[in-house]
Amino acid sequence: MSWFKRLKEGIQTATRNKKEAPEGLWYKCDRCKETSTAKELRENFHKCPKCNYHTRIGSDDYFEIIFDAEYQLLHEELKSKDALSFEDVKSYPQRLEEAYKKNSVSDAITVALGNIDENKLVIACMDFSFIGGSMGSVVGERISRAIDSAIASKCPLLIISKSGGARMMESAYSLMQMAKTSAKLTLLARAGYPFFSLMTDPTTGGVTASFAMLGDINMAEPECLIGFAGPRVIKETIKRELPDGFQTAEFLLEKGFLDFIVDRKNLKETMRDLLVLFAKN
């Protein structure tokens, strides 16, 4: 039998006998559209191996990247409640229940205490997958208690922001978290411990307008979206054309809103250097 005939017969496999690739085995980059394996993506700090695009990751991934080994989760007992009996297309309890089923986290921010070398660090990391990383009462209270934990542990605080803004299902309760978290950070400053703010894609709305921009060091991941309102709203308000990329980390760095941009592969080393630097001062 000729090689051509064998090839022709070989591709005539019945559909029922064809094997599908396991789900989650491959990753297609949102930016360059190139395909790589999930293993390659994970080993490259969840960045595209072809173009270095930083994918969105959750709090457990950041804890694994930054902390040396084991870490302790804090304030997990706090859970969101429907104080306003809010309902639009769905009720707020329904949205919360769906978020719990889809995620391993218990709200849009997770707090942990761990070590980098011999230095303690409290990290409060937001999860966009939980109702768009929206800031509700639990997010504000966990940040407040994370500050208390940092003071009690005599160590700095790192907040990793990834949010669509305020959780409107909690209305004024949500908006008050902007003032609450901003005011509470003054206690950390008075105690003499630094606050590091890392902005990731996206950091928008009330989170940007409060604690995300109040760090002793403000840093961001490459090309992440940082802003308050969307481009359409801003354009309609000021009646002017907007510069290209005006809400990217690179644009904000150029205008002085950020201290530096950090590649995710260098994040742990950067935090190690900052802890040592601020400890000496």
Image: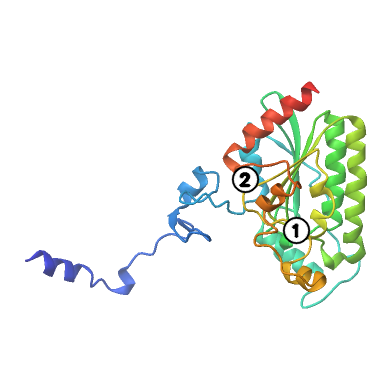
Whole-percent x and y of residue 80?
Answer: 83, 58
The residue closer to the viewer here, 241 or 146, is 241
Whole-percent x and y of residue 201?
Answer: 66, 55
Label 2 is placed on what type of residue? Answer: Asp
> What's the distance in space between the residues labelled 2 and 1, CA to CA?
24 Å
Q: Specify the quadrant that holds the C terminus.
A: top right
Whole-percent x and y of residue 263?
Answer: 60, 42
Q: Helix or strand or loop: what does disc 2 sit on?
A: helix
Whole-percent x and y of residue 61?
Answer: 62, 45
Q: Residue furthest bottom?
A: 89
Q: Which residue is mark 1?
A: 227
**Residue 130 vertical placement versus 141 (above, below):** below
Q: Helix or strand or loop: what does disc 1 sit on?
A: loop
**Residue 159 vertical placement versus 153 (above, below):** below
Left or right? Give the position of 167 relative to 18.
right
Q: Which residue is mark 2?
A: 61
